[in-house]
Image (tube, coloured by chain):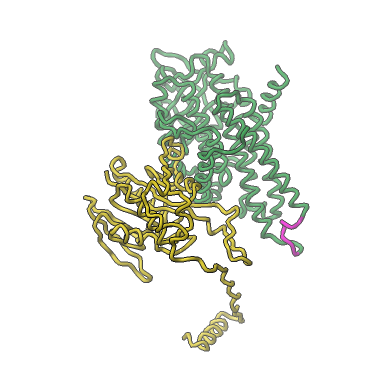
Amino acid sequence: MFNIIVCAKQVPDTNEIKINPETGSLIRDGVPSILNPDDANALEEALKVKDTDPDNIHVTVVSMGPPQAQDMLFECIAMGADEAVLLSDRAVGGSDTWATSNAITAVIKKLPFDMIFSGRQAIDGDTAQVGPQIAEKLDLPLVTYVQKFEIASDKKSVKVERQLEDGYEVIEAPIPCMLTCTKELNTPRYMNMAGIFNPDKKITVWSAKDVEVDLTTVGLKASPTNVFRSFTPKPKGKGTMLSGDTEKDVAQKLVGSLKKKHVI
Amino acid sequence: MNFQLTKEQEFVRKMVREFAETEVEPLAADIDKEHRFPVETVEKMAKYGLMGIPFPTEYGGAGGDNISYAITVEELARVCASTAVIVSAHTSLCCWPIYKYGTEEQKRKYLPDLLSGKKLGAFGLTEPNAGTDASGQQTRAELDGDEWVINGAKCFITNGGFADVFIVMAMTDKSQGNHGISAFIVEKTDPGFSVGKTEDKMGICASSTTELIFQNMRIPKDRLIGGLGKGFKVAMSTLDGGRIGIASQALGIAQGALDVTIEYMKQRKQFGKKLSQFQALTFVVADLATKIEAARLLVYKAAYNETAGLPYGVNAAMAKLFAAETAMEVTTKCVQLHGGYGYTKDYPVERMMRDAKITEIYEGTSEVQRMVIASNVIGK
């Protein structure tokens, strides 16, 4: 059996979220929780590998969060994952990225794996740190920002494109390894009816005790970083609208103002 | 008493809504205009298991329940009523009678391909002179050795031009009246079978509505389904369930029209105010939303009863009657709320109003539903 682990997080849908301007905190009431979008790309890539040999490839989704995160894991299984494990314990609540990766690493160490996929980053924190930290703690080769993925037919190595700001690198890595995935990698599939109604949906909930994690390395108190303040950036002004009788007039005004600012 | 959807039903809504908004809605206006059956959408629906929801996995179904099926049709109809009726006619009118009345051999032969969406199903009862009065069947089936020979024609057949498998009613003994009607499984490749003219309709223009013609069509003896002379019972019980599908379609059309209208009212300004700030108009919306919710409760109740094994015929009739008339009222008022723009094809409410009308007519007109309900509550 070739075992793939996908790290996924349940996040508030930031398209629907607002920030209380007085307190600076997120207004989470009534905001739907969703599977973090980059993690959906990670799961899709794992499922594409599984599609090539469904009986011999096993996909397990791993997450940490409150019991409600099981809804997100239900969705992952309805998309085609074989099973899911949720670490849910007050002892790991309030963890920052370092503490989170300690906890997730402890979960992964209990599971068989050949490859680990995660999303590039979560839309609620935008840190992009947990994936790389897990790779470091498991001493695995890591490629971040994967935008294209190929696995060798002998499943001994992978060849990926790693996204850069103005291009990409082609990187080969041996298996086992860890990849963090971007939205450019694929389009996640929908859930399917057979998956939704599958009576054997296997979601296992573990406590901190179950994963033998050192409790001094997880949770709020063990977290070296704290959110000091969050705030809403002030919206930018409207900008200047240029007008003129002809397109040429407008273009000249634009060139003039760009010159004034030494842009051109 | 519990009005909470199950986890599975909630995820069905989430999945189908995403699917409908991404894959179905972008095509809706074009396929309506071109009167084009969306083959590509049917393939996608098959891939995600939408063509066999309320059937057991042992025959290739998804193992779901009838509320999930109703939600699926509702969510599809919310953006495209034509796409919704493809699923409804296939599921309720072809897969269901085979599942309910088929022999084990018939189920094993037909259901896996139908429920996986590899094949599409349809249902042939209506004839030019046998609509609401289904007993006036002129299509005849006669046994000739080991084969049935069928002659006649059907009209207004949903999915007609694209279906592979049909449940067809034909008279096997005219002297017996309704008890002389039998049901048959017909395949599009059967010798003597052909598809006649395609109807040019007011609405659900992307749905294929055709005649079916049987000219000395010969089919094996074992295609009889439900027993000799049991066709009327097969047809009527099939339509009981079919009404839940059409009621769901009507519900979805109404909800879709109201959703786009509310969006419009929040944008459109007259007299310096948004339409959504005029109390007279918001009261119209309040009434429509209330009727839609009432329709939803009737539809889900009928679907619940079916899954629970309780009687559901009269619930289905009430659900279809109320949801269809609600759809017509909601879409008409939504066009009104859009003003002149609502009368143009630039806004979807124009299509939705045309689509809504059929829900008061097919699978039993509103008059038939009232007959079913009245005979149930008053007695015959």
Q: Residue at x 43, y 40 (%)?
A: A195
B8, B273: nearer the viewer: B8
Chain A tint in image: yellow
Q: Residue at x 39, y 12 (%)?
A: B145
Tell me the quarter of the picture where residue A147 sits: bottom left
Q: Magenta span has B277?
A: yes
Asked if residue B166 is positioned above or below residue A61 in the image, the reply reads: above
Q: Position of residue B43 (x, y in %)?
A: 43, 42
Q: Position of residue B77 (x, y in %)?
A: 57, 42
B57, B232: nearer the viewer: B57
Q: Residue at x 52, y 29 (%)?
A: B93
Q: Quadrant of the N terminus of chain B?
A: top right
**Chain shown in green:** B
Q: Magenta span has A158?
A: no
Magenta range: B272-278
Marks counted in the figure total: 0
Most distant residue in the front direction? A216
Q: Is residue B202 visible?
A: no
Asked if residue B151 is positioned above or below residue A31 in the image, the reply reads: above
Q: Position of residue B87 (x, y in %)?
A: 51, 37
Q: Quadrant of the C terminus of chain B?
A: top right
Q: Residue at x 57, y 54 (%)?
A: A31
Tell me the quarter of the picture where residue B325 sits: top right
Q: Position of residue A101 (x, y in %)?
A: 38, 58
A129, B180: nearer the viewer: A129
Asked if residue B108 is positioned above or below residue A204 in the image, the reply reads: above
Q: Is residue B165 visible?
A: yes
Most distant residue in the top direction? B175
